[in-house]
Image (tube, rainbow, N blue to C red):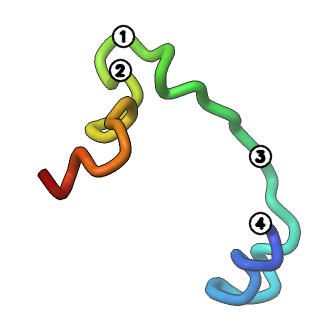
Amino acid sequence: MIDSLVKYFGPQAAEPFDIVEQDWAAEEFTRGSYGGRLSAGALTQ
């Protein structure tokens, strides 16, 4: 992940000052985002 950030944002991205992990499915209002629980092929039907 850090390597990808450095590629796009430069060497300063190699030293993050904070890392946050988020369980979006546990959030009351997002419920896992708009596609959090779609089954395979659901967006093409």
| Residue pointed to by mark 2 | 31
CA–CA distance in space, label 1 to label 2? 6 Å
8 displayed left or right of 26: right
Q: Look at the picture and state if 34 lies above or below 8.
A: above
Residue type, numbered disc 3: Asp
CA–CA distance in space, label 4 to label 1? 27 Å
The earlier-in-sequence mark between 2 and 4 is 4
Residue type, numbered disc 4: Met
CA–CA distance in space, label 2 to label 4? 25 Å
The earlier-in-sequence mark between 4 and 1 is 4
What is the secondary structure assignment of the residue under circle 2? loop
36 displayed left or right of 21: left
Q: Position of residue 43 (x, y in %)?
A: 21, 52
Identity of the residue drawn at 23% across and 45% down: 42
Q: Are marks 2 and 4 in contact (CB under 8 Å)?
A: no
Mark 4 crowd level (few <14, some 14–19, many ≥20, 10 Å Cα): few
Identity of the residue drawn at 35% across and 37% down: 39
| Residue pointed to by mark 3 | 18
Q: Are marks 4 and 3 in contact (CB under 8 Å)?
A: no
| Residue pointed to by mark 1 | 28
What is the secondary structure assignment of the residue under circle 1? loop
Q: Nearer the viewer, mark 1 or mark 2?
A: 2
Residue type, numbered disc 1: Glu
Mark 3 crowd level (few <14, some 14–19, many ≥20, 10 Å Cα): few
Q: Are marks 4 and 1 in contact (CB under 8 Å)?
A: no
Q: Are marks 1 and 2 in contact (CB under 8 Å)?
A: yes
- Quarter of the image with the N terminus in it: bottom right
The earlier-in-sequence mark between 2 and 3 is 3
